[in-house]
Image: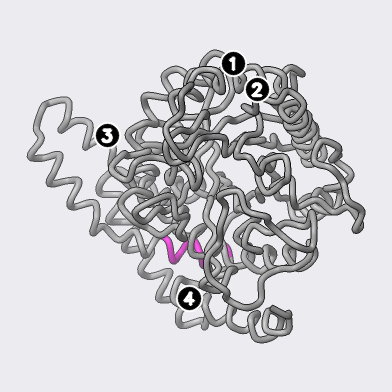
């Protein structure tokens, strides 16, 4: 930005600082708190969930990125370069979330139950150089042994055992990430197992899932380096009638096995609020992993924007003082727009929601509520919406040397012209 623009941003911030101070909010402390929050940026937005297991990419299994915008990453080095570009446009220091299919095996076929930390050495070194954390996910889809729609719940014990070994291998990789980087890695387990039409037996697949998960988690790991999470879902493509790993199933599992519970904002009925679940779940679980997404009519994984649901999630995290117990990650994949722009839009939207929540006068709202002055509560809730949060956000971007919201597109288009346009389709 020009010097004149910087001066305008700083002037606007000083006025906003005084406005928030009148409500007892110290914006400097708020920005320090925001700077301490790391959001996990998902690798699969950069290449349409293709991975590097084979040149053919995904083979199905209910995961679909729609669109054909040119320039997607085709190699690990391209994906890392694209992520670097995105991180340059996002204020703060964050994390990167990998799936097992993003291994680097030098062109040698490696079965999923045989993957090792060395297959992710390039990712670990890249993250260490940049001070990033890494998170991890087993890939229980797009594989011949997942073609039936069943993995950890498969009635064939040989197939089930293959996927158990895959989960165990992924936990070892996640722990290696944590030890190498000195930051805990969250390894999140999601499986697609379910039935398209009405099942005759809902019980036995879930019994097998309990057994499989217990086997995967049988080796204790130091929480300073590794945390386990389990993720439920209401339905999926090909599992519309029944999903073995439902929210209720994993809620019970997370409570009894002391794992994190993953709540994906696209994995519930459209009228359900993930934000409303946070305070209930955290009364009984060790902590939460949030996968913030944006579903339109179904679990469509649209790019996260600063909408009501995202703001409600951020409000719950701040108002309940849960930030120390919750890991935040994004989960969307849109191939219809510039993929780097999608990352930047989503990450900045989540950060802005957290900033708005941190700038909210919760003590005043609680005073109204405790005195049953619901008129005053609603008046203040509405007033907060037009307080000058944007001036604080612009100042935060300025201090982190990243473009403002109306300026980062030119950097992305320049990168598209110089780098992305030279990649083949």
Q: Which colour scheme is used?
A: one colour
Picture layout, residue 344 above or below residue 263: below
Q: For the residues carrying marks 1 and 2, which lies nearer the camera in this image?
A: 2
Is label 4 in contact with label 1 (beta carbons under 8 Å)? no
The Cα–Cα distance between marks 4 and 1, rounded to whole angstroms, is 51 Å
Mark closer to the chain start, 4 or 1 = 4
Q: Which residue is drawn at 47% across and 37% down?
A: 233
The Cα–Cα distance between marks 1 and 2, rounded to whole angstroms, is 10 Å
For label 2, the SS is: helix
Task: Pick whichever, 6 or 136, lies toward us.
Answer: 136
Place residue 146 in its image quadrant. Answer: top right
Q: Position of residue 100 (x, y in %)?
A: 74, 45
For label 4, the SS is: helix
Is label 1 in contact with label 3 (beta carbons under 8 Å)? no
Mark number, residue 213: 2
Is label 1 in contact with label 2 (beta carbons under 8 Å)? yes
Q: Is residue 397 magenta?
A: yes
The magenta span reads 393-400
Mark closer to the chain start, 3 or 4 = 4
Mark closer to the chain start, 4 or 2 = 4
In this picture, residue 228 sits left or right of residue 306 = right
In this picture, residue 404 sits left or right of residue 224 = left
The Cα–Cα distance between marks 2 and 3, rounded to whole angstroms, is 42 Å
Q: Position of residue 83 (x, y in %)?
A: 67, 63
Picture layout, residue 380 above or below residue 229: below
Place residue 5 in its image quadrant. Answer: bottom left
Residue 9 is at least partly visible in this image: yes
């Amino acid at each position: 930005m020009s010097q004149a623009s910087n001066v305008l941003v700083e002037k606007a911030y000083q006025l906003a600082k005084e406005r928030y101070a009148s409500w007892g909010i110290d914006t400097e402390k708020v920005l320090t708190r925001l700077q301490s929050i790391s959001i996990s940026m998902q690798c699969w937005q950069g290449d349409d969930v293709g991975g590097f297991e084979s040149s053919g990419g995904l083979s199905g299994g209910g995961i679909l990125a729609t669109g054909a915008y040119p320039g997607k990453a085709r190699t690990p080095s391209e994906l890392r370069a694209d992520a670097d570009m995105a991180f340059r446009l996002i204020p703060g220091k964050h994390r990167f979330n990998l799936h097992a299919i993003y291994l680097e095996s030098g062109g040698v076929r490696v079965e999923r139950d045989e993957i090792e930390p060395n297959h992710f050495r390039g990712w670990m070194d890249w993250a260490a150089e940049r001070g990033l954390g890494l998170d991890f996910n087993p890939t229980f889809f797009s594989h011949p042994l997942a073609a039936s729609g069943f993995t950890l719940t498969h009635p064939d014990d040989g197939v089930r055992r293959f996927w158990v070994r895959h989960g165990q291998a992924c936990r070892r990789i996640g722990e290696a990430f944590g030890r190498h980087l000195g930051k805990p890695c969250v390894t999140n387990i999601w499986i697609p197992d379910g039935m398209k039409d009405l099942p005759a037996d809902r019980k036995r697949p879930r019994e097998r899932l309990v057994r499989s998960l217990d086997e995967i988690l049988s080796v204790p790991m130091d929480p300073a380096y590794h945390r386990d999470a389990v993720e439920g879902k209401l339905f999926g493509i090909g599992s519309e009638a029944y999903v073995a790993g439902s929210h209720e199933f994993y809620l019970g599992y997370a409570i009894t096995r002391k794992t994190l519970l993953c709540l994906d904002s696209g994995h519930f009925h459209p009228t359900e609020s993930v934000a409303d679940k946070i305070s209930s779940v955290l009364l009984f679980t060790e902590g939460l992993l949030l996968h913030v997404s944006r579903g339109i009519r179904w679990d469509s994984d649209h790019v996260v924007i600063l909408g009501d649901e995202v703001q409600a999630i951020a409000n719950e995290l701040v108002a309940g003082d849960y930030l120390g117990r919750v890991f935040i990650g994004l989960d969307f994949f849109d191939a219809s727009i510039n993929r780097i722009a999608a990352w930047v839009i989503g990450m900045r939207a989540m950060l802005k929601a957290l900033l708005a929540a941190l700038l909210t006068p919760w003590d005043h709202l609680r005073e109204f509520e405790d005195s049953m002055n619901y008129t005053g509560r609603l008046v203040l809730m509405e007033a907060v919406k037009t307080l000058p949060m944007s001036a604080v956000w612009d100042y935060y971007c300025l201090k982190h040397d990243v473009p403002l919201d109306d300026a980062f597109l030119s950097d992305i288009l320049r990168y598209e012209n110089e780098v992305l346009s030279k990649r083949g389709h």
